[in-house]
Image (cartoon, helix red, strand yellow):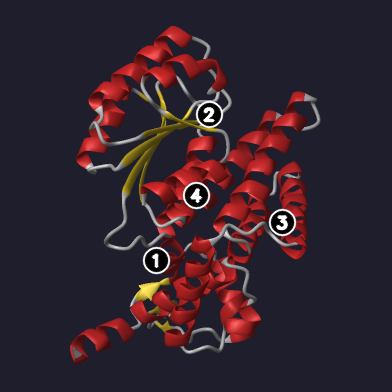
Amino acid sequence: MADKRSDARAKRHPIQVVVRRTGLTADVLRAWEKRYGVIEPGRSEGGRRLYSDDDIERLRLLRRATGAGRRISQIAGLPTEELAALVKEDEREEAVVAIEPDVETVQAAEVHLRDALAAAARLDAHELEAVLGRAMVTLSASTFVERVAGPLMRRIGELWSHGDVSPANEHLASAVLQRVVGKIIEAAEPPSSALNLVVATPAHQVHEFGALFAAATAAAEGWRVTYLGRDLPAVDIAAAARETSADAVALSIVHAPDTAVLESELRELRKELAVNAPLLVGGAAVPSLRKVLDEIEAVQLSSMDELRAILAQLS
């Protein structure tokens, strides 16, 4: 037991590993260290910061606590045991009732969105990632997705369609947002009892943000998520579901240019999936596919709130 504790305290992880495992940006991590002394990193012979397993666990707890709406200045000094208890309490209360973001949270999200749009308009990828990183640690995952990430891409799409920004702005914002939202999925630590969810877009569906946001939402709800990305044939989605023993599969379908092909893919996927694995389908094209979705008894979703509700029921 003592050896395990010593290993957990050993300063051996570089900052890149900590960023990947916690979902925090390097900028936020350094700011928390400097302003609040949340942890004390070690140093390599070359002067690089090094962190222990205990440090990483503490940072994960701090991220979850700030994501629940707590101020870092108020919780930075808490012992790790108290912090873990606080996080557990917050998550238990959040599971009991879904609370609409308060005025302060909504206003904060609007500021983050404004700053993100300005950075994207300037083609400033570094600043855009920093803004989104700050939003990610100060807002809950659901608020971040629904009030910052989603509106950001919709607004940039509108500006591009009106000729107010170039395709370069849209591509830059997409690339940065994919990285940031991906961190939510990677940083999630589902319990050993967590259910498995496979998320993808079916063949010929190249718009993947709906699927990416769904994956991040599910990860934040405690599911173990396998995110497959875009444009994947039914046979491959089904194979991934079997390989991961998926308890459900979620698809995002934004448009249906060839309805017959898409209907065939959906029927094939339903046939290949385990009988007891629900198929959850969301996206702008759902209304035009209602007939086939009813036929294969897919759960049709119109919002992330509905997704969260279904995931809670399945859990």
Q: Disc 2 marks which amino acid?
A: His
Residue 75 visible in the displayed image: yes
Q: Mark 2 points at which residue?
A: 207
Q: Name the residue under label 1.
A: 17
Mark 2 or mark 3, whichever is nearer to me: 3
Which of the pair 154/221 is nearer the observer? Answer: 221
Where 225 sits versus 156, above or below?
below
**What kind of element bears circle 3?**
helix
Q: Residue at x 58, y 26 (%)?
A: 284
Which of the pair 309/116 is nearer the observer? Answer: 309
- Give how far across and how far down residue 48 sits, in percent: 44, 77
Which of the pair 217/92 is nearer the observer? Answer: 92
| Mark 1 nearby-residue class (10 Å; few <14, some 14–19, many ≥20) | some
Tell me how far mark 4 sits from mark 2, CA to CA: 17 Å
Tell me how far mark 2 sits from mark 1, CA to CA: 30 Å
Tell me how far mark 4 sits from mark 3, CA to CA: 17 Å
| Mark 4 nearby-residue class (10 Å; few <14, some 14–19, many ≥20) | many
Q: Disc 3 marks which amino acid?
A: Ala
